[in-house]
Amino acid sequence: MTARIIDGKQLAEKLKLQLVPQLARLKEQGIVPSLTVILVGDDPASQVYVNHKANTFNKLGLTSSVETYPAQMTEAELLERIHTLNNDPAVNGILVQLPLPPHFNADTVIEAISPAKDVDGFHVSNAGALMIGKPTFIPCTPYGVMKMLEDEQVNIRGAEAVVVGASNIVGKPMALLLQKAGATVTICNSKTRDLGAQTRRADILVVATGKPEMITGDMIKPGAVVIDVGINRGQDGKLKGDVQFESAREVASAITPVPGGVGPMTIVMLLINTVHAAEQQNL
Ligand code: GUN
């Protein structure tokens, strides 16, 4: 079997087009959704991500601004800035790019963002709302994965889903969303004893470990749908996923490529969350 390629770029474009009439209706009511992105330090990968987010927003006519601060900024200064943005009615969404420099406590910073403006869905009250099945803002990456599965008409109800990686940003919310959609979910972590035995049970396999090509074709159940969240830069400079694409595509029924899979979806879900935030704050 050679797997169908799940084209995240194409789906992202389709979802962006679907937003156009919604944005036009909001504009008629004087509402232009606006996002402020905060970047602390000069991590080159973060700079690329942040500029890409801002460009995507601006192209669709949303307002976005990027505030860049030196790595020496203190946590108190950052908290003060977040407090000001929380109280600024012209700002609908606030995103603090992670990772922060080591002298910041990321949890403290995220908890300082107003839950109503937390378009990343990372605030503990948004994470809790998702846990009880009543989400307001769903973290963008797992939200994008759910949209891809929906668009591919993957049958989630009753399926065995295995999530490799248990982060607050991807793995845990991913597992909750799959479970809400009716899957039986296993979450694996770096201590999982026989990873292959777990992943080979999966009808739907989502991998978010940040370890390049750690999942190989022999760890995949024939016919599985494989979603690769990883983006790793190889020594040859090429982007690689957490799944070894060439061996996996011989076994899976459908698979996301890297790049062009989950990545483009994450930004669109951020757009959708920001529009949602603007609606909640104004309508
Ligand atoms: N760093 C990498 N991905 C993300 C994300 O989705 N949100 C934020 N805030 N930082 C990130």
Image (cartoon, grey):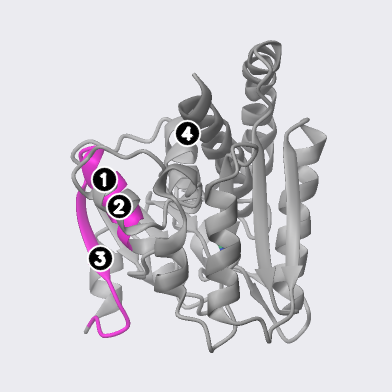
Q: Which residues are magenta?
A: 172-192
Determine the residue positioned at 25% across, 52% down. Answer: 128
Say which label, 1 or 4, has the lower sequence index.
1
Do residues under tags 4 and 3 come within 8 Å of each other at their CB atoms?
A: no
Q: Nearer the viewer, mark 4 or mark 3?
A: 3
Q: Which mark is residue 187?
A: 3
Q: Residues within 10 Å of mark 3 (few under 14, many from 20)?
A: some
Query: What amino acid type is highlighted by mark number 4?
Result: Glu
Mark pair 1, 2: CA separation: 6 Å
User: Would residue 282 appear left or right of 70 to someone viewing this image?
Assistant: left
Q: Nearer the viewer, mark 3 or mark 2?
A: 2
Do residues under tags 3 and 2 come within 8 Å of each other at their CB atoms?
A: no
Mark pair 3, 2: CA separation: 22 Å
Q: Residues within 10 Å of mark 1 (few under 14, many from 20)?
A: some
Say which label, 2 or 4, has the lower sequence index.
2
Q: Residue 219, how many percent across, how many down?
A: 36, 70
Q: Check disc 4 and report the residue beneath it.
A: 152
Say which label, 4 or 3, has the lower sequence index.
4
